[in-house]
Image (tube, grey):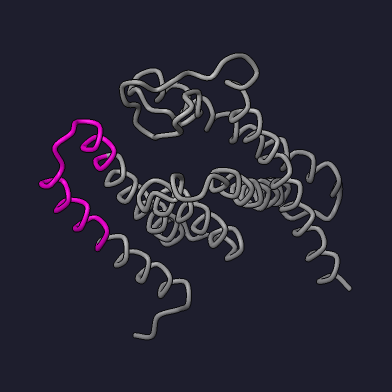
Amino acid sequence: MKLTKREKLILGLSLFTCALIVKGIIDLFTLRQRTDLLTQLLAIAQYFGFIAMIVVPDLIERRMHFHIPDHVYISVVFFAFLALICGNGLHFYRLFPWWDTAEHLVSGVSLGFIGYWLVEVISDHSSKHTFLKAIVAILMALGCGAVWEMCEYTSDGIQGTNFQRYMKTGRSVLKKGDQPRIGRDALYDTMKDIFVDFGGASAGVVIVLVYKYKKSD
């Protein structure tokens, strides 16, 4: 049976992530500090989350008999790979200070795609009210971005993480001696993420509108 390009993508990413899971579990036996163990366990959990994100949509499609557009699916997978695999798993947050911003930009574009697609589905692909659909799609993306910031805030409070970068070190798991940011500086990461989400979502919606315009010609 010949695999489609999408199925090849799922298989390749799943095998790559499984290899990272095995390596991560092996590395657990070499770590001694509690914070390093927590960081590694968090990375392994995110590997499993990534596999779920690339497999579950395909299963839903098969069970519910509807198609998720390739540009929507691929953009979500790309964002999940940047965030769950590269960001924490491969420590890109530490290697590249701008990685979080790039990730939020991609997530904004992805959410713009998703938002416009969902509005299209709800409106039964009507060609009316294009501008209103674009506004709703952007607002939906911003809502998702706000929920993500709520999750980061909750994790920072309960698990002692530093996802909102309120500590100067920028680590995912806090260590003794971390210095807290003060005033507006403590708000910078959260507000920057929201602004980038807005920009990415707007770009995603514009891309969809330009594609639809060219397709209709």
Q: Is residue 134 left or right of residue 175?
A: right
What x and y, as percent, mark residue 159?
33, 23
Q: Front-most of 207 and 157? A: 157
What x and y, as percent, mark residue 92?
44, 51
Q: Front-most of 71 and 173? A: 173
Q: Front-most of 139 and 188? A: 188
What x and y, as percent, mark residue 107?
59, 47
The quadrant of the image that shows the N terminus is: bottom left
User: Residue at 38% across / 27% down in the picture?
Assistant: 161
Overall secondary structure of the magenta stretch?
A: helix
The quadrant of the image that shows the C terminus is: bottom right
**Position of 110 relative to 158 (above/below):** below
User: Residue at 66% across / 51% down in the picture?
Assistant: 109
Residue 22 in the magenta stretch? The answer is yes
User: Residue at 57% across / 58% down in the picture?
Assistant: 75
Magenta region, residue range: 19-41
What x and y, as percent, mark residue 81?
45, 56
Residue 115 in the magenta stretch? The answer is no
Q: Is residue 121 left or right of residue 26?
A: right
Residue situated furthest right in the rendering: 217
User: Residue at 24% across / 40% down in the picture?
Assistant: 41
Residue situated furthest bottom in the rendering: 2
Say how many tags the image has: 0
Q: Image quadrant of residue 139?
A: top right
